[in-house]
């Protein structure tokens, strides 16, 4: 029930406008969002790098509604263009965007200068995930596997956690055996242990794939994996439009709301 509440709050335009503009809102989000400026993300990235992990940086903002917003977001990523070119992963949002996002990734990846530099995200709660993976692997496209963070109807998505987890493990094994470098994005310790056991049993080297987690979540587990010699990437979100992202993190673990509230009263 709380999950549904936070997901519906994530869609509230008025709350979003209020929260994103208030200084108290920005303080509340700071555990899971690096800050509002590029410099905040770079500062967080340096600290994560120093702890032996690589990073993905995400300028928050979803479902842009006009060309101006799209252009200004694209401009920010252009400012971050690196030599040699960096890797760009196109995040996956709710199901109205699934097909067009995948089409976009396929189209970008077909351009010779982008080969191996553009990746997709697959959500294991989607019933179509296995066939999407097959097509992406046919073209050698790197995949981030996650469980999925949106509310989707039963016709297209598994509803029970046990089904989503079982599909995750099934797809994870396909990815790990594919010979392509993929990212396993989860904080689920049981699944992470299964991935480690599968890699060891099948002699899949520790640099053939990576674990990925979100900034501020299970930092203990992130560091433990690095100590054990596994590759770990932390996803660092930043930007003024942090509200829907934070609400989805609360939906995944409502106890985070208490945690955030406690931090607010700390000096
Ligand atoms: P699950 O939700 O089953 O949780 C397992 C355990 O992990 C919990 O018991 C708890 O210990 C810990 N945990 C999970 N979430 C937590 C939280 N918010 N706070 C504290 N502890 C938590 N989704 C999407 O739809 N599109 C996308 O593009 C992405 N991208 C993405 C990138 C990366 C790097 C990650 C890690 C995740 C995503 N996601 C995503 C989100 C993903 O789909 C999913 O919603 C969350 O990762 C939570 O699922 P878990 O796999 O962690 O398992």
Image (spheres, helix red, strand yellow):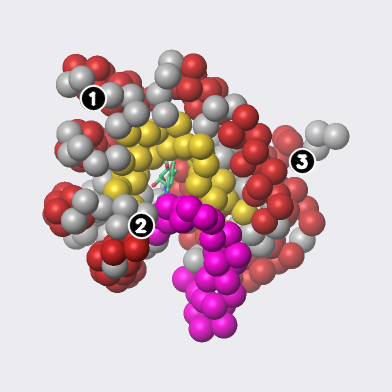
Inspect the magenta stretch and tell me whether residue 26 lies in it.
no
Sequence-wise first label, 2 or 1: 2
Quickly name the residue at label 1: 204
Q: Quadrant of ligand 1?
A: top left
- Please state the horizontal and vertical placement of residue 56, each as a whole percent of the image: 50, 47
Q: Is residue 147 something one can see in this rendering?
A: no
Q: Is mark 2 within 8 Å of ligand 1?
A: no
**Residue found farthest to the front:** 84
Up the image or down, 99 lies above or below 145; here it is below
- State whether residue 93 appears in this view: yes
Mark 2 lies on residue: 118
- Please tell me whether residue 162 is drawn above or below residue 40 in the rendered image: above
Residue 101, horizontal then vertical, whole percent: 32, 66
Q: Which residue is the extreme one toward the right?
A: 267
Using a 10 Å C-alpha cutoff, classify the residue at mark 2 as few (fewer than 14 neighbours), some (14 to 19) or many (20 or more).
Answer: some
Q: Residue at x 57, y 71 (%)?
A: 75
Residue shown at the point (60%, 34%) measured from the top left:
48
Q: CA distance from mark 3 to mark 1?
A: 44 Å
Q: Secondary structure at mark 3?
A: helix
Label ID, residue 157: none
Q: Quadrant of residue 176?
A: top left
At 54% across and 50% down in the image, what residue appears? 57
- Work out whether mark 3 precedes mark 2 in sequence or the reverse, and give the earlier one: 2
Choose mark 3 or mark 1, whichever is in front. 1
Q: Are marks 3 and 1 in contact (CB under 8 Å)?
A: no
Q: Are marks 3 and 2 in contact (CB under 8 Å)?
A: no
Determine which of the numbered discs, if any, sits on residue 264 in the image. 3
The boundaries of the magenta stretch are: 63-90
Q: Nearer the viewer, mark 3 or mark 2?
A: 2
């Amino acid at each position: 029930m709380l999950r549904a509440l936070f997901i519906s709050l994530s869609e509230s335009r008025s709350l979003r406008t209020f929260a994103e503009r208030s200084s108290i809102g920005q303080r509340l989000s700071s555990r899971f969002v690096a800050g509002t400026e590029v410099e905040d993300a770079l500062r967080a990235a340096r600290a994560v790098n120093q702890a032996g992990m690589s990073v993905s940086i995400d300028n928050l903002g979803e479902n842009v509604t006009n060309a101006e917003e799209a252009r200004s977001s694209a401009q920010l990523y252009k400012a971050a263009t690196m030599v040699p070119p960096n890797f760009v992963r196109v995040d996956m949002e709710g199901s109205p965007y699934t097909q067009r996002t995948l089409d976009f990734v396929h189209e970008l990846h077909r351009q010779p200068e982008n080969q191996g530099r553009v990746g997709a995200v697959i959500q294991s709660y989607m019933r179509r995930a296995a066939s999407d993976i097959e097509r992406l692997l046919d073209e050698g496209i790197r995949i981030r596997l996650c469980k999925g963070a949106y509310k989707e109807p039963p016709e297209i998505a598994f509803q029970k956690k046990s089904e989503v987890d079982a599909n995750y493990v099934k797809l994870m094994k396909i990815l790990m055996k594919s010979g392509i470098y993929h990212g396993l994005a989860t904080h689920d310790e049981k699944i992470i242990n299964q991935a480690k056991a599968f890699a060891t049993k099948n002699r899949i080297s520790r640099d053939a794939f990576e674990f990925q987690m979100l900034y501020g979540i299970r930092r203990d587990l992130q560091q433990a994996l690095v100590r054990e010699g596994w590759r770990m990437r932390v996803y660092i979100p930043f930007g003024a439009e942090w509200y829907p992202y934070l609400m989805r993190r609360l939906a995944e673990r409502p106890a985070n709301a208490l945690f955030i509230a406690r931090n607010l009263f700390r000096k």
